[in-house]
Image: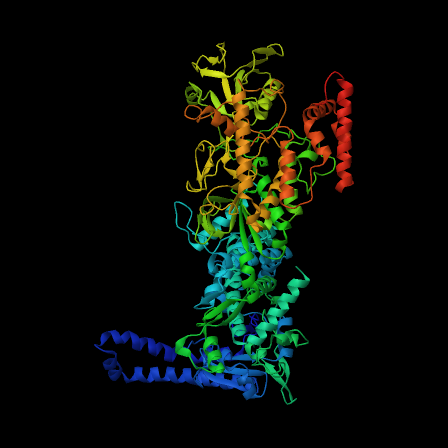
């Protein structure tokens, strides 16, 4: 706005009513007024008003008297008003500028709308003073002072009691409710007390991070890192940027440039309805998310008030949120637009700005008043005067005139950004008002603006778009054209076509730029983001990474979820603990906290995952509630198009990436055997997959339970069920019949057929039967699944026999084939280059977390140097592994049974659970199927050799330490001995303070503890081998 309006003493009412008002009322006493009313009533008796007036001369005289009295009254009031201010220089007009909206100034009628925008300091210079008056006649004679004097401005903004705000001028902005902008006095104080803390340092950090992300997203998905980008109107980008910023930093709703926004199913929303639902949703949320957007901060501050009288009403909440939107979106967009225009016009200043950016980036990667008052002013000639300010006068701070006042600014018409780097008159610069009523969103707007300008100007040179119709125009003509403005709530450029040209440095870097998409933010996805952030390319700004996580938090399988859905979000059950000691299991770059149980429960692992993300600052690169629904690749552009569905907002978003890292895990889709009769048991609700299991209460009244599968989850099921007092029949492929624990545990072979479910009859492959089975739980493993990849990328079936290697990628649901190093597609380079996509986390029976980091180092090596993969060597390695596995399968006359299969209690999530072939078994070559099942399974020390080979390939110095191999081999003994310590109540004492030293010394402490534990096991069971 050109003026910031105040009214001096506007709140004085009652006993001190002005004599002038009494005089005015006396002019409207009954005689002329009654005559006029009588005249109008009589008009109905005549055919026309003219005939009535001609026939009733008395009425004409009465009407003229009324008009005369009205005019005389106004003139007397006007003259008295002028006298009150000693005829201080300024405007004398029929109408005040705030009561009539003519498109131009008419001398003696109105100063004109937004007059200071056009005349700047001109009217003040003409008057000879930096405070000028305006006295209007209609609708009521009144006084307005316009101020461009810094001293007077400071006096005004420093005394809210003497100069209250004219809130009636802002009624339009109270559409959604009372708010901080349209209130004064105690109401304003109460609202500001709650609203101001919403603008916190954490919010500013969110603004900065999200603004950078949004601008980078624009580069990537809108501009496509083009060398030249023509923009028909600069508002096309500034409005888009600020809208997206206020969406996430203001409302916690992340939107992208390519998002397809729709209303929630079943209804169309108004903005007010949307705000109300947001308030209700945040209030009713069972789990309060840590948010730092303005909306959440405002709600938190309001809910934190102990005094209910101090709380904002729902209407006031909506009103303030609305003001946050208007002020945080439109004003910043228009300001940025003018900034880009001026930078385009003044190339020398843009170059200074660019060099400054480079240097920075290189160095740091309602009270009352009862008296009249006066203003003491001094003009440019040094003359002093006292300006009388009668109570009730309107006062407008003319910020534009103040900013162009030559008393405070050298050459005010010139674009000189450097003037703000030195000493300048602070009181003469009011971009965000000042004093107690200064803009609470100043930090928000400044943070956003600096982020936008520095990010774009660091990469693009902005120039005026050349258009043939303006060929030959002078600089001043061009400047006038581009700065021609329109007025709404704020001023904005009418039309400003610009062109953004990639600077030479970035043109050279473009070939090295990589946008990387990570699917999933579980253990694999977190490792991917962390290792990318470690890379020099990321630190140099050449690589960016975005991870999409479908769930509402990170952690993947370790994040609990109820056993609902088809299938549930995780197979995590209540008793799950790791089957590896955490020093062996942990990421090589981040240890578990001191005193952590050696075999921690799932909740501890989840906390560890979150600590890992926090320690390496991974969350800014992770989008939650973002389900990747499709990923397609354009061979011509060599880019992936990734479409994501945001469940919380029911919206879709599309982005483009150079690489995809598939890290979505493989413990979600249950694998069911094709055993005859199983479908009848499933239909009768007498059988279910272990993905739905949480604790023994899931079995209800069932007393005898069949557990199918000898993997870790199958063994944990047996342990839980036995502890609950139930009888367990454990089906283990290749096992011989055996009864233990006084008949509570029966080990049987493979299920051959599920017989009558009502009788609970089961037929095993040795011909024996069990009856009275109340329920069967199938711990038969999970399928590898990539539902977002189309069939032309990955074919959903077993691959054809080898050799030769197939030209396409296949997913058998057991393995992905062919992959170089179990990571990279080794197929037709024209269809799917090895460096375009990476699959991590597929190997099983491994220490997963350190292996994931090693895989990622190899991935980045290939992304940076695609030629580092030797096609001949990779083909030889794949075929050699295939032949070794084929020979092993053929040599086996019967499936091998794990030695621990009859010892319930070994727990893990790192290995597959399947013991029974699934849907391929009746239609695929059993040898090929067995090879698929074993392809990503690492036996013995193969995982450690694989990890060292990955690090050697990636030219990374780390190698697997000997103690890790030693403790991995001893994991079974360590696990059993640790459980004995837990049962004895000694476990906490053993780990208390272990790891406190941190670093290598902390690891040494853990290794020493594990060796002590092994020694204890040998002393307790000297007859057993530690392995």
Q: Observer-nearest residue: 516 or 299? A: 516
* Position in image of residue 494 (x %, y %): 44, 72
* Position in image of residue 528 (x %, y %): 59, 45
Q: Residue shown at 45%/65% (left/top)? A: 236
Looking at the image, the residue that sits furthest to the left is: 47
Report the side of 929 relative to 841 (left or right). left
Residue 750 appearing in the image: yes
Q: How many numbered circles does the render carry?
A: 0
Q: Observer-nearest residue: 360 or 441? A: 360
Q: Residue shown at 63%/24% (left/top)? A: 906
* Position in image of residue 109 (x %, y %): 43, 83
Residue 168 appearing in the image: no
Q: Is residue 785 above or below residue 777?
A: below
Q: Observer-nearest residue: 223 or 370? A: 223
Q: Is residue 655 above or below residue 440?
A: above
Q: Observer-nearest residue: 81 or 55? A: 81
Q: Quadrant of residue 854?
A: top right
Q: Is residue 218 above or below residue 828?
A: below
């Amino acid at each position: 706005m050109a003026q910031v309006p105040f009214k001096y003493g506007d709140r004085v009412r009652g006993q001190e009513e002005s004599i002038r008002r009494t005089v005015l009322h006396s002019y409207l006493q009954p005689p002329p007024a009654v005559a006029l009313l009588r005249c109008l009533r009589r008009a109905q008796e005549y055919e026309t008003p003219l005939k009535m007036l001609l026939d009733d001369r008395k009425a004409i005289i009465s009407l003229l008297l009324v008009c005369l009295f009205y005019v005389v009254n106004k003139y007397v009031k006007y003259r008295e008003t002028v006298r009150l201010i000693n005829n201080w220089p300024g405007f004398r007009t029929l109408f005040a500028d705030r009561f009539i909206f003519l498109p131009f100034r008419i001398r003696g009628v109105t100063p004109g709308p937004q007059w200071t925008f056009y005349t700047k300091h001109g009217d003040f210079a003409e008057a000879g003073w930096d405070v000028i008056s305006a006295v209007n006649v209609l609708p009521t004679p009144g006084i307005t002072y316009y101020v461009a004097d810094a001293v007077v401005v400071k006096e005004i903004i420093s005394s809210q009691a003497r100069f209250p705000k004219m809130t009636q001028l802002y009624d339009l902005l109270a559409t959604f409710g009372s708010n901080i902008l349209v209130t004064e006095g105690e109401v304003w104080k109460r609202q500001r007390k709650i609203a101001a803390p919403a603008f916190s340092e954490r919010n500013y950090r969110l603004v900065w991070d999200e603004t950078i992300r949004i601008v980078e997203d624009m580069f990537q998905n809108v501009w496509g890192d083009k060398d030249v980008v023509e923009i028909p109107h600069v508002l096309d980008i500034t409005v888009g940027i600020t809208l997206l910023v206020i969406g996430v930093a203001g409302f916690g709703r992340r939107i992208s440039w390519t998002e397809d926004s729709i209303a929630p199913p079943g209804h169309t929303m108004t903005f007010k309805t949307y705000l109300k639902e947001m308030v209700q949703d945040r209030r009713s949320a069972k789990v309060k998310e840590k948010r730092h957007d303005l909306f959440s901060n405002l709600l938190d501050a309001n809910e934190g008030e102990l005094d209910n009288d101090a709380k904002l009403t729902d209407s006031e909440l909506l009103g303030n949120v609305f003001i946050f939107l208007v002020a945080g979106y439109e004003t910043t967009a228009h300001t940025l637009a003018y900034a880009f225009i001026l930078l385009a016009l003044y190339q020398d200043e843009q170059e200074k700005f660019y060099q400054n950016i480079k240097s920075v980036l290189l160095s740091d990667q309602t009270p009352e008043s009862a008296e009249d008052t006066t203003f003491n002013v001094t003009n440019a000639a040094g003359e002093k005067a006292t300006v009388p300010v009668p109570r009730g006068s309107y006062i407008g701070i003319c910020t534009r005139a103040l900013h162009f006042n030559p008393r405070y600014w050298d050459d005010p018409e010139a674009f000189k950004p450097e003037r703000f780097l030195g000493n300048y008159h602070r009181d003469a610069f009011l971009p965000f008002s000042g004093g107690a009523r200064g803009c609470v969103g100043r930090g928000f707007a400044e943070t956003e603006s600096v982020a936008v300008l520095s990010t774009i100007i660091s990469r693009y040179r902005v120039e005026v778009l050349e258009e043939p119709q303006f060929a030959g125009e002078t600089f001043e003509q061009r400047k006038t054209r581009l700065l021609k403005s329109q007025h709404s709530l704020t001023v904005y450029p009418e039309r400003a076509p610009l062109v953004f040209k990639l600077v030479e440095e970035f043109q050279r870097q473009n070939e090295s730029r990589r946008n990387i998409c990570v699917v999933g933010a579980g253990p694999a996805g977190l490792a991917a983001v962390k290792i990318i952030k470690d890379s020099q390319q990321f630190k140099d700004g050449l690589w960016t990474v975005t991870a999409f996580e479908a769930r509402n938090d990170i952690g993947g399988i370790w994040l609990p979820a109820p056993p609902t859905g088809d299938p549930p979000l995780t197979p995590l059950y209540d008793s799950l603990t790791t089957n590896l000691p955490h020093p062996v299991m942990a990421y090589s770059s981040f240890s578990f906290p001191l005193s952590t149980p050696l075999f921690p429960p799932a909740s501890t692992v989840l906390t560890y995952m979150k600590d890992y993300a926090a320690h390496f600052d991974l969350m800014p690169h992770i989008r939650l509630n973002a389900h990747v629904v499709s990923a397609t690749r354009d061979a011509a552009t060599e880019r992936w198009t990734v479409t994501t569905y945001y469940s919380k907002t029911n919206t879709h978003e599309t982005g483009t990436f150079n690489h995809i890292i598939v890290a979505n895990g493989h413990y979600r889709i249950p694998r069911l055997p094709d055993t005859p009769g199983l479908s009848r048991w499933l239909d009768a609700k007498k059988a279910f997959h272990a993905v739905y299991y949480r604790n023994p209460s899931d079995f209800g009244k069932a007393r005898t339970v069949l557990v199918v599968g000898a993997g870790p989850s199958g063994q944990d099921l047996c342990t839980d069920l036995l502890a609950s007092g139930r009888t367990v029949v454990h089906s283990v492929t290749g096992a011989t019949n055996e009864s233990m624990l006084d008949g509570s545990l029966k080990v049987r072979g493979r299920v051959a057929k599920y017989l009558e479910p009502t009788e609970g009859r089961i037929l095993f492959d040795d011909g024996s039967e069990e009856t009275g089975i109340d329920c069967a739980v199938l711990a038969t493993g999970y399928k590898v699944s990539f539902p977002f990849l189309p069939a032309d990328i990955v074919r959903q079936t077993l691959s054809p026999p080898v050799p030769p290697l197939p030209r396409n990628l296949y997913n058998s649901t057991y393995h992905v084939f062919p992959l170089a190093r179990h990571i990279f597609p080794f197929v037709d380079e024209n269809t799917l280059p090895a460096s375009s996509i990476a699959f991590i986390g597929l190997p099983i029976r491994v220490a997963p977390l350190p292996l994931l980091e090693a895989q990622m180092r190899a991935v980045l090596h290939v992304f940076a140097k695609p030629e580092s993969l030797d096609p001949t060597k990779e083909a030889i390695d794949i075929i050699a592994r295939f032949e070794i596995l084929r020979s092993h399968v053929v040599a086996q006359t019967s499936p091998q049974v794990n030695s621990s299969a009859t010892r319930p209690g070994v727990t893990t999530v790192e290995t597959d659970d399947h013991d029974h072939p699934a849907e391929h078994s009746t239609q695929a070559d059993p040898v090929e199927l067995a090879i698929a099942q074993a392809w990503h399974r690492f036996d013995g020390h193969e995982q450690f050799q694989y990890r060292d080979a990955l690090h050697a390939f990636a030219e990374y110095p780390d190698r697997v330490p000997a103690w890790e191999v030693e403790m991995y081999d001893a994991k079974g003994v360590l696990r059993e001995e640790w459980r004995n310590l837990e049962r004895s109540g000694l476990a906490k004492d053993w780990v208390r303070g272990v790891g406190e030293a941190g670093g290598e010394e902390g690891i040494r402490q853990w290794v020493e503890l594990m060796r002590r534990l092994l020694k204890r096991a040998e002393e307790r069971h000297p007859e057993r081998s530690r392995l």
